[in-house]
Image: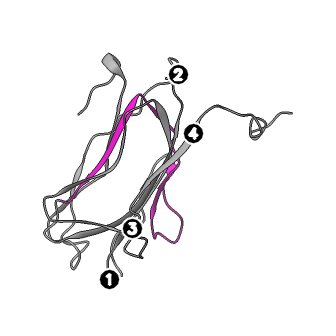
């Protein structure tokens, strides 16, 4: 069997997991509210694995709120622009994903991070590193934010091969 799905039926020995903004009470309050200046952890994993998918959206009544995130060469969101989706595989020995609210108002965030726990690191796999960037969003997002917003920060750690920024 050949093709992109040829390994689909193979057992890999990995465990799938998810970190999300679910409501631990079983209710329907499955969101995370981040106060101005606050930082929230979306995922913290202390064993080797691979992030497979990140989905994030922000609650906002402003119809002009910027939700369509595009980063060449990867399309990171659906055409309707209602959420951020990243399908870029990110291997790690341990990982932490955080969001910092640099806006003047609360940010209401809905998210999930899908990952696989592999048990061991692949020595041939590179590590995906990101750096925070700030953008002034006051003019583009008049009612939901009056300051700056910092992008999601993720850090993959791999012993001496990894540096946080």
Q: What residue is rendered at 77% in x and 39% in y?
A: 9
Is there CB contact under 8 Å for labels 4 and 3? Answer: no
Q: Which residue is mark 1?
A: 61
Q: Which residue is mark 3?
A: 23
Is there CB contact under 8 Å for labels 4 and 1? Answer: no
Q: Residues within 10 Å of mark 1 (few under 14, many from 20)?
A: few
Per the rendering, the mark at residue 15 is 4
Q: CA distance from mark 2 to mark 1?
A: 44 Å
The quarter of the image holding the N terminus is: top right
Image x and y of residue 162, in percent: 32, 24
Q: Is residue 143 left or right of residue 79?
A: left
Per the rendering, the mark at residue 122 is 2
Q: CA distance from mark 4 to mark 3?
A: 23 Å
Q: Which residues are magenta?
A: 74-101
Q: What residue is rendered at 52% in x and 21% in y?
A: 122
User: Under tag 3, what secondary structure?
Assistant: loop
Q: Is tag 1's residue or tag 3's residue first in the polypeptide sequence?
A: 3
Q: Is tag 2's residue or tag 1's residue first in the polypeptide sequence?
A: 1
Location of residue 161 with respect to 64 vertically, above or below: above
């Amino acid at each position: 069997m050949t093709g992109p799905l040829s390994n689909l039926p193979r057992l890999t020995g990995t465990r799938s997991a998810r970190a999300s903004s679910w409501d631990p009470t079983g209710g329907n309050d499955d969101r995370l509210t981040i106060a101005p200046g606050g930082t929230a952890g979306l995922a913290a994993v202390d064993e080797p694995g691979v992030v497979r998918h990140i989905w994030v959206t922000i609650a906002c009544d402003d119809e002009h709120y910027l939700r369509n995130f595009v980063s060449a060469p990867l399309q990171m969101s659906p055409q309707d622009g209602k959420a951020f989706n990243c399908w870029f595989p990110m291997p790690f020995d341990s990982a932490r994903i955080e969001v910092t609210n640099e806006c003047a108002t609360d940010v209401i965030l809905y998210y999930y991070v899908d990952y696989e726990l592999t048990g061991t690191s692949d020595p041939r796999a590179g590590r995906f590193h990101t750096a925070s960037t700030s953008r002034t969003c006051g003019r583009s997002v008049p009612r939901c934010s009056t300051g700056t917003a910092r992008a999601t920060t993720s850090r993959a750690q791999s012993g001496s091969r990894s540096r946080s920024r």
